[in-house]
Image: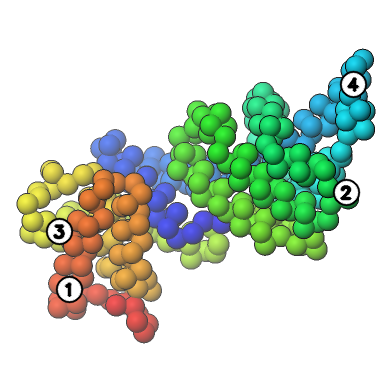
Amino acid sequence: MLTRRHIRVKVLQSLYAWSQDKQPDYAPQHKFLAHSLEHMQDLQALMLLALVAIRDHAQKFLEKSQLKHLASDLERNPSFNLLQNKVIEMLAVHPGLKVFAKNRKLTHWIKDDEYIAILFNALKSWDGYNDYLALTDPSFDQDKAFVIQMYREVLAPNDKLYEYLEDKSLTWVDDFPWVNTAIVKTFNKLSEKNPSTLFVPGVFKDKEDRAFSKMLFQKVLDSTQELDEVMKGKTPNWDQERIADLDLLILRMGITEFLYFPSIPVRVTINEYLEIAKEYSTPKSSLFINGILDHIVKEFMEQGKLNKSGRGLT
């Protein structure tokens, strides 16, 4: 599920696409935002399905190896630890993941199985794989530890996989680190008695997060002129034409949250956009944005414009 920060990033990406397009019709960007959010869970499902595909590839590799005329003792008497990995089997039979993959037509690892072969070859050359194969009747916790380590050290850093995903969807480039972190967290929390937690269809945690994404996007679009008026005179040595596009959009989003989202504390808004600026904009952007937003908050407080409900929200 998405965090609020990732929702903000997705809204920022959609606003940036709109700002470059300059079309008065907002409908295409609303579609872009919705598609981008849905597509992110496609990536999550694909990465989980890659583990199953690697296991299935290993099964075929093992069968071929045993049929070799000059098969080694190791090939004749292989370890079945990967094929019998309990966590990967949970993924293989997970009803929610299977239905989601079918509905979203996620057949990537069937059509482009050469990338599974690349990942399997990377796995075979990884020391952790041989250590795992050497285990006798691994426990659930050992299976889980292997999958986590394999994911972190073999799948996530694989350049060929990254290039493939980038080619399939540009939005996946930004989603990839978040999805990897989310998957590892899910594995860490996984218990043998609760396999359903491996994949939960649905991008948003709750209806409030869904409403937040739509309202933030629409409010920035509807209030652009008003938001830019607020910024006038508060950008020393800068005029609007000289502010980086992303910085301008981040400022608009921050001011929008000050004005139209009474339940979000001011400090949360500022901290979130500073972190987003550090990751997506120029090196000095976070300092610049922090100064402007702080100035605007003080002015809004003096003018009674900060409509924040609840204790500690200002």
Give the residue displayed 20% in from the left and 67% down from the top: 294
Which picture quadrant has residue 65?
top right
Q: Which quarter of the rendered picture does the N terminus lie within?
A: bottom right
Dot placed on the residue nearer the N-terminal end, 4 or 2 = 4
Q: Which residue is mark 4?
A: 71
Real-space CA distance between mark 3 and mark 1, rounded to the nearest whole angstrom: 13 Å
Q: Secondary structure at mark 4?
A: loop
Q: Which residue is mark 2?
A: 136
Real-space CA distance between mark 4 and mark 1, rounded to the nearest whole angstrom: 76 Å
Q: Do tag 1 and tag 2 residues touch (Cβ < 8 Å)?
A: no
Q: Secondary structure at mark 1?
A: helix
Q: How is the image coloured?
A: rainbow
Which picture quadrant has residue 109?
top right
Residue 286 lies left or right of residue 51; in this view the side is left
Q: Secondary structure at mark 3?
A: helix
**Label of residue 118 in the image:** none
Find residue 25 and report its horizontal and vertical position in percent: 31, 41
Say which of marks 3 and 1 sits in front. 1
Real-space CA distance between mark 2 and mark 3, rounded to the nearest whole angstrom: 65 Å
Dot placed on the residue nearer the N-terminal end, 4 or 1 = 4
Q: Residues within 10 Å of mark 2 (few under 14, many from 20)?
A: few
Dot placed on the residue nearer the N-terminal end, 3 or 4 = 4
Dot placed on the residue nearer the N-terminal end, 2 or 3 = 2
Find residue 193 and report its horizontal and vertical position in percent: 80, 63
Q: Which residue is mark 3?
A: 231
